[in-house]
Image (spheres, rainbow, N blue to C red):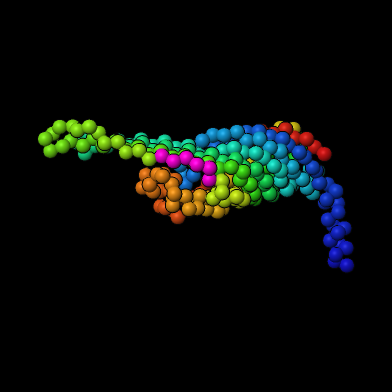
Amino acid sequence: MKRYFFILVLCPFLLKAQFSITPFAGLNTTKMSEEYSGYANGGNYGIAGVEIEKQFNLNRYFPLNFSLVTGLSYLSNGFNRTSIFAISIGSGSYSYEATNLEMRYLQVPLIARVNWRPFALVEDWSLFFGAGVSINRLNYAHISEQATEVSLTLNKSGLLPPPTLTTYQDSRDVTSIAVKNPIFQRIEFGMKFKHVQVTYRISVSMQDMYFKGIEKTWQVPSGDSFYIKAHNSRGITTEKYTEIVLGWRFYK
């Protein structure tokens, strides 16, 4: 009896479900965990995809409803960092570090979203907040690094000898040792106005994104590699990115 009662209650609710498809494009900004201060700035990259949303309405004029969201997007992102450090001649040295990381992902989000109409009678405008995960598929990963140090130390006679130059560099495809299917926790908020949707997302990796074992063959020593030093200091490499996207909604 209880089962039939539940079905009777649920059926009108499901009949009020609204289905929409939203192609979108936008900008991704990627950061990675670093040795000292949380996250280091990375780079800005384009993102494009489609979002599928099923929205459940309890009542036409009720200001709150919820929806389930999935979809597919392509992201070619990465991380770029350059560091220059110099101290005065006499004790002196000059150092340069550059790290470049390239990645290509397919992203499938699974998001629960709460939608709010501030004005119940205005059906074409609403705000929303969502939370869930993004299941990513890594198709490609490449890293390159360079570390250069120039020593400029005065000798005992006070003369400046020729500088000593030390350079290390390496560049390689690391897809085989990367995390193939990382999961990112995601929160988002945005606005819907008629067919237009604007969304701001924050995603943080839930696994260690470090290229396991790279330090064994990497030609840049651990003490000079930003990527390896950052992982060793924290014991984990975390990827964080924000996205702002603009979409156009089609209703079914």
Q: Residue at x 86, y 54 (%)?
A: 11
145 and 78: which is toward the camera: 145
Q: Which residues are magenta?
A: 169-174
Counting every numbered tag in the picture gives: 0
122 and 140: which is toward the camera: 140
* Residue 111 position (above or below residue 157): below
State the image coordinates of residue 216 (x, y, percent, origin top left): 44, 52
The quarter of the image holding the N terminus is: bottom right
State the image coordinates of residue 85 (x, y, percent, origin top left): 33, 37
33 and 124: which is toward the camera: 33
Is the stretch drawn in magenta largely helix, strand or loop? strand
Residue with the most extreme left position = 157
- Is residue 172 located in the magenta-colored stretch of the structure? yes
- Can you tell which quarter of the image residue 152 is in? top left
The quarter of the image holding the C terminus is: top right
- Is residue 150 located in the magenta-colored stretch of the structure? no
State the image coordinates of residue 164 (x, y, percent, origin top left): 26, 36
